[in-house]
Image (cartoon, helix red, strand yellow):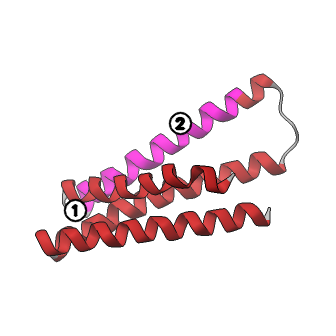
Amino acid sequence: MAHLARGARKLAALQLLLLAVTSAVFYVRYGGFQAGSVWGGGVIAMAHTLLLQWRRGCADKGRALNAGESLRLLYRTALERFVLVALLFALALGVLQLDPLALIAGFIAGQLALVAGLNKTD
């Protein structure tokens, strides 16, 4: 369990590093509002990662599942992640009116950290 927590901290640090670099590029190129929008996309990516890590921890701590139960859990988790990301994007674009390009760039930067960190959290 401590190994998973250490991996999650490393993943969060990588996400923050990539977001800081992306935000700095947007700040220099476009300005402060766009740099803040990058962080909005990063928050969405980090929320997605937190949900994924939480679900993984619950599955690891729980009883052994049969194939059907594992598949249902997989589909449920995928649906939850999709709904979470869609709702947060709707909030960011509709209510907060963040810059769409910067928001997507921040989300991609956060997701790149997840992809790069997958083999380090196992």
Say which residue appears at 69% left-offset and 49% top-offset: 56
Q: Position of residue 114 (x, y in %)?
A: 50, 53
Residue 63, visible in the rendered structure: yes
Q: In this view, does 47 lie to the left or right of 73?
A: left
Q: Find numbered disc 2 in the image and state the secondary structure of the residue it sits on.
A: helix
Nearer to me, 32 or 113: 113
Q: Distance between the residues labelled 1 and 2?
A: 25 Å
Give residue 14's mark: none
Seen as rendered, the residue at the extreme top is 68
Say which residue appears at 46% left-offset and 64% top-offset: 15
Say which residue appears at 64% left-offset and 34% top-offset: 74
| Mark 1 closeness class: few <14, some 14–19, many ≥20 residues within 10 Å | many
Q: In this view, does 35 lie to the left or right of 47?
A: left
- Whether 24 is drawn above or below 46: the answer is below
Give the magenta-colored segment's residue range: 71-95
Where on the picture, by quarter, is residue 91? bottom left
Magenta segment includes 43 = no
Say which residue appears at 25% left-offset and 64% top-offset: 96
Magenta segment includes 74 = yes
Give residue 79's mark: 2
Seen as rendered, the residue at the extreme right is 63
- Mark with earlier residue (1, 2): 2
Residue 30, visible in the rendered structure: no
Where on the picture, by quarter, is residue 95? bottom left
Q: Where is residue 64 in the image (x, y as percent from the top left)?
A: 87, 37
- Residue indicated by mark 1: 98
Amino acid type, label 2: Leu
Amino acid type, label 1: Leu
Q: Where is residue 85 in the image (x, y as percent from the top left)?
A: 42, 48
Asked if the residue under mark 2 is in contact with the one under mark 1, i.e. CB atoms within 8 Å, the reply is no
